[in-house]
Image: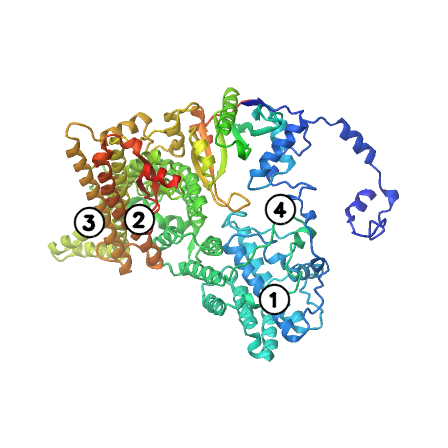
Amino acid sequence: MVLEQGLRKLHVEEQRGPQLFSDNTVTADDLIDITETLKRMRLALQPDSIIKEPSFDLFEGTHSLEVNNKKLDTSLITLSQEETEYDCNTAHGESQVEKLGFVTGIVDQLCRYLICWLNDYQLLPTTILSCRYLEYLLIESANIDDMVYLKTGDLLYDQVLCSAIYGISYFAKFVERLMKNGGVCPEEDLNFNSMGLDFLSYVCEPSKINKSLKVSLEHLSAYGDTANHLVHLLKLIECLVCMEECLTKYSAGTAHLDKLMAEALYLQNKNDSETFILPLGCFSMGIQKRLSNQSPPKSLVIPSKNYDGFIVMATDLKLILSVNEAKTVMELMQFTKFFNKATQRHVISRAVFFAFIIRHDETVLGRYTFSQFAQLHPLEFSLASTEISKKLPEEAVPVLEDITNVLFDWYQNAAQNTSRYRQGYNRQLLLWDALQVQMENIELEFESKMMADRANEPFSDDSMLPFTSWIFAMKVTAMIEFVLKGFDLDVYKPFESYVMFWYSYYLSYQLESCLEKIHKFVDSRINKIVSLNKKIKKLKAGEKKEKLRAQYRFLMDTEMAQLQTNKKFLTFLLMECTIIRSLSLSQVLQFAILKSFNVIDNKSTTKCQFTSNELLYELRMKVFSSIGVPEVVPYNMIESTLNDFMISEPMFALKLKKTMECIQKETQNASIAVDNVIKCIASDKDGEVLYSATRLVKPQATDYFQRLKTSAKAIQLNSKVINAKLENKQTKNDPKSLFTMRLKSCENASSFFPLLELVDTRRQKSKSKK
Amino acid sequence: MISYRPLDLGNLLHFEHLKRLIDADLSEPYSIYVYRFFLNRWPELAYLAFDDDSEKSDEPIGCVICKQESHRNRRMRGYIGMLAVESKYRGRGIAKTLVKKAIKKMQKEGCDEIMLETEVSNNVALNLYEGMGFLRMKRMFRYYLNEGDAFKLILPLTAKSCVRTTFLEENVD
């Protein structure tokens, strides 16, 4: 025990010769020389044995470092004399002007490094942690759990530089907390390799730092215009320090973000960064050599003139905070659907999003309990004015809790990076599918005991199952998103595009049917209420009439508005569905034409020595293989669907013309639907027919649909180009040898619908010869 | 003539050469542990290529390094960890032969699928693997130290590869 206690206190003191331990608690007599034992054991080792922890796997291995390997051992980093001997407690610079230049240069570099770290996904040790002052101040402050200031004797260093560094460190601490919240993926989205440094955990709130920054600004006022750049930098840092308020106070205020953008714009336009000279050794790889490190050596980043990076960050964060204005769950959902869809938002805004809406007080946006949140989603879709909403069975309560969790997953997934986003849907499909089964059983049981929610009461067979229908719509939407996102991420090869577009077409069709059913039900409920009024008018005055009038008023007050909004929203979703279905079908038809000319096949062109086309199809469909409804189409059936679309003799030309006309019609349908949708988004209001609920994400939603319209036009044009190429007399006989296929995303078009482009291999060959 | 041989684990010269071959090409450095992790546990899944006509005919000019393990105790997954061919020998189908030999071996050993990751920008590797039937299953954001995205590729060998692990029976052994 004594020895163990002694060992705990051990640390290596460099350049001290024989006196290894500073506190003299461990002497040479306490130690046992194991050199001989080690040598003996080494000799007994077989070359094929590996000594490792059982949990140490390949993942650990690829992150392992290696002593004496230049690429992996940071202790081998060579530092210049200036770097080694850099003294933070010296006021570098001969004159006051030079000192001001140095301090400005250091703060400028740190601010630009912040953006490299966050916007360009760089590492901490190669950006802000490479600053000798930041390292020194964090180490010294952690020793006494309070902010330590430099002692150079010059306030530019002792006050101004220190306050800037603490401001930046405080902001980094906020980022660290965001990462720990789990809104984004560590390493992929954000790196926080702190090198074992404590990022101001002992500074609980920012007032001390703000005060220090104010003192610095006062001090700089004596320098006049010469300190202008530094003043703006400190003001920018002040804004960064405030940024945590969106989570500490759930503040949706954006004044500090507007100010941040103004400061960043000034600094960007001023373009002074390159005029500052830094003291030699001030930024260095030294920290990688000195402190706890889990990464291989990496050179410092060269920061660009990147103050506009702060503008990107602030703009995206402002967008996120505007979610606070959502008046309904429908608006919240539409916000979530569109804010990160076409453009991946800044990592800070993505990380803030989930923590901002799902709060510590177990509310959503501070206004809905989790249980309300779970019920409002179906209510603002299919549940309004239903029997089950009025007499919720007890068995449904735990399922509602499950719904809350899956919804949380859905909301969190929307803020993920573009690749994780698709993977998130992969996971969610199983969750929605399981929920559907659970809720369907409860609703069927409810129907057998109580009244069913049907569009045409009482005897029709069109039971709507409001919860199940909503879950089904969520699931199929997720399936479509998963399929089409694969095109965006370049996951599919051209030969797979038939299956994937066909599947997207098939799923859109399923979704459309579901939405139509709900729409019909909602319509019937609206008509039912309206018909009450007609009944009242026909009745003579009396008790019966008054009773009916009271019922009518009650329904008008409590259900009508929601039913009408739901109906218009469902119409909007139906239109969106039409767009996806029409574009998918156009692509399917295009593929069929190409296959009919024998320039592409829906099978892998490779000689499948180890696998088969059927296995490849099943692997691609693995994600959906367990989904009950809609079922995955078996391989032979998907083959027959393609045969149905293909064109053959006799009357090849006529059939081709008809297929081309069909593409024309479908793309036109999509374009018309997009125009209506965009008009609805722009109007911003609950319109007469459509309601998009996209008030808070107008530009983002418009951009998404505008791109779909561009895709519709591009598919149409591409179809004509392909036809012209394939019908050409010179190429008609053997098009397969002359053309190859590729999937190509067009500028300003939707990356969900890349074009099936016919590439002339003769041109490619002649280009490569040149 | 190019000849292909399985790895002789006892031959340290071969080990050093293949390490050098791979280090020269990789976007991120591997520690000695990674090499040993593969080679010591699955020496039979590493193949080397030699130029018999060269003066240094005992120095490998290409290699493939693989492993095979149970994936979540549900299916056997082969994994191609590293593949490299010396630059002056490229374009002669050596990589393809090495991969084929490794896949054949893993198939024989009962693998249900073969998996690997490659950089999104590595068209040569993508063409090679996709030419053998591998499918891109997912894209991974900033997967490599050089900040590049990666594709995860899978070649299905049996029907087990095409079923979600949740719905596969657990292997008793």
What amino acid is labelled 1 in the image? Ile
Instruction: Classify 10 Å Cα crowding around label 3: few (below 14), some (14-19), many (20 and above).
Output: few
Q: Is residue A216 visible?
A: yes
Q: Earlier in the sequence, mark 2 or mark 4?
A: 4
Q: Secondary structure at mark 2?
A: helix
**Near-viewer residue (A283 or A768):** A768
Q: Secondary structure at mark 3?
A: helix
Instruction: Classify 10 Å Cα crowding around label 4: few (below 14), some (14-19), many (20 and above).
Output: some
Q: Earlier in the sequence, mark 1 or mark 4?
A: 1
Q: Which residue is mark 1?
A: A277
Q: Earlier in the sequence, mark 4 or mark 3?
A: 4
Q: Earlier in the sequence, mark 3 or mark 1?
A: 1
Q: Relative to A657, is A6 on the left or the right?
A: right
Mark 1 vs mark 4: in front: 1
Say which chain tag 4 marks: A
Say which chain tag 1 marks: A
